[in-house]
Image: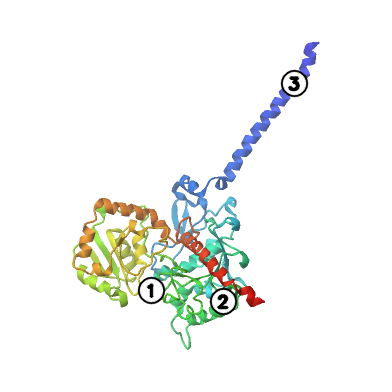
Amino acid sequence: MLDRKMQPLLESRRLLSCVVFMAIFLMIFSCSVLLKSSSRYLIPESVLMLVLPNKTSELGTRISYSDDPSRNAPLPLITVGGKRTTSENQDGVRRNSESLKRKCDPSQALLKVYMYDLPLQFHFGLLGWKGKGYQIWPDVGNVDHVPRYPGGLNLQHSMEYWLTLDLLSSNTPGVMRPCMAVRVMNSSAADVIFVPFFSSLSYNRHSKLEGKEKISKDRFLQDELVKYLMNQEEWRSSGGKDHLIIAHHPNSMLEARWKISAAMFLLADFGRYPTEIANLKKDIIAPYRHVALSVGNESAPFEKRPILAYFQGAIYRKDGGMIRQKLYQLLKDVKDVHFAYGSVRQNGIRHASRGMASSKFCLNIAGDTPSSNRLFDAIVSHCVPVIVSDDIELPFEDVLDYSEFCIFVRASDAVKKRFLLNLLRRVTRADWTKMWQKLKEVAHHFEYQYPSKQGDAVQMIWEAVSHKISHVHLELHKDNRFRQQLIE
């Protein structure tokens, strides 16, 4: 009798055990699926990049430029399964997975940027791109639709292009990038107003009169830009102080710069600017885009660099560049020094890349302006830069100590007989290697690429812009002191 009463109870317990077992099994299975499908959200990108073999396109397709920057129409390089291939072979390219198709959250971004929707003629139209209908911006979510920037020496001032692409991608699903700067659609929510005028490309391509033109296309675009800005409520309310304008080529914005001098400029140096127009207090120095090939992990150590010092470029310059001629006379016959004229013609960039990668020290000597892309060519070649330019301003110097990987020589000392040679020959292998190791650590800060990566040149520029915001706010708040009285 007792057994009969206990039987239903035992069956109930067995059934309950089965239910609990099944529930636990389903929970474990669901968690494993969830982890696989959303691991990129749960694991930081920096960690994931270490886990993925060869940093393949598992994190998304990346665009940089071909190893021959002298070509006029460089093709993007796509990283696929650890192999690099041109965009002509993209049929099998694995696109970003659905789990990566997310936007930057403006509330999490360091910098909120409002970008004017300038007409095509000011930006991608200069690259020959034509949108469909009223389309202003290209589809940056598809590498096939991103217009290419011209190669050769045009590339050294191309940061206007990379920054614009980065802002566009911040609102584009499927593009994996850091969330340091994000484009906002309401200017009142912005920290800074970005003016997407490709001023350096405009100067390089259109500064000379063509046909029956009375003014050049570059001058016309500058005039039109000034008119546009003066009609914008954002400019009028701040006087342009919270606007970011890129004028990296020393001769870009030559006519307009006086009329828009209140804005924050992104420049190569201050060589051709009076202090009332451009200065470190309000403006930003950005690195040139290097044209020499990056050595990457194939960096030769001390004993495999037979050339003591390397310089190749224009020797006869005016103004501060006269020092190049003096150094040429001092160094041209030294056996282990390469000091020669060079240009981009006849594979000049490729030859210079090999020379710098085979040299212990690379000379960065003032030319017509205090700076040149030669410094950044040296950095990506892991060739210790020797800077002979008393008035040079360096990008990101508030966070980078250049004395850890560069040697600075005053111009007055450099032209003394044997001073430079004796200085370089006294550098020991251990001291040189220390600087060489530091170059390998910092080189990524000077790389422009799309999509941008954490700590690259694009992200470093946005960080530099963020450092200026407090000064902008200070100036605007001081301007507001008596504005209420004027309204009344």
Q: Is residue 76 left or right of residue 138?
A: left
Front residue of 218/403: it is: 403
Q: Which residue is mark 3?
A: 11
Query: What is the quadrant of residue 319 in the picture?
Result: bottom left
Q: Inspect the image, locate mark 2, and give the three-letter code of the amino acid beneath it.
A: Leu
Estimate the x, y position of residue 320 in percent, counting from the top left. 31, 74
**Label 1 secondary element:** loop
What is the quadrant of the N terminus in the image?
top right
Q: Is residue 442 left or right of residue 61?
A: left
Q: Inspect the image, locate mark 3, and give the three-letter code of the amino acid beneath it.
A: Glu
Query: What is the quadrant of residue 420 in the picture?
Result: bottom left
Q: Which residue is mark 1?
A: 271
Q: Which residue is mark 2?
A: 229
Front residue of 237/145: it is: 237
Q: Earlier in the sequence, mark 2 or mark 3?
A: 3
* Residue 82, numbered circle: none
- Measure how far apart labels 2 and 1 are at the Cα level: 26 Å
Q: How is the image coloured?
A: rainbow
Q: Is residue 345 left or right of residue 228?
A: left
Image point 52% across, 66% down: which residue?
164
Front residue of 159/267: it is: 267
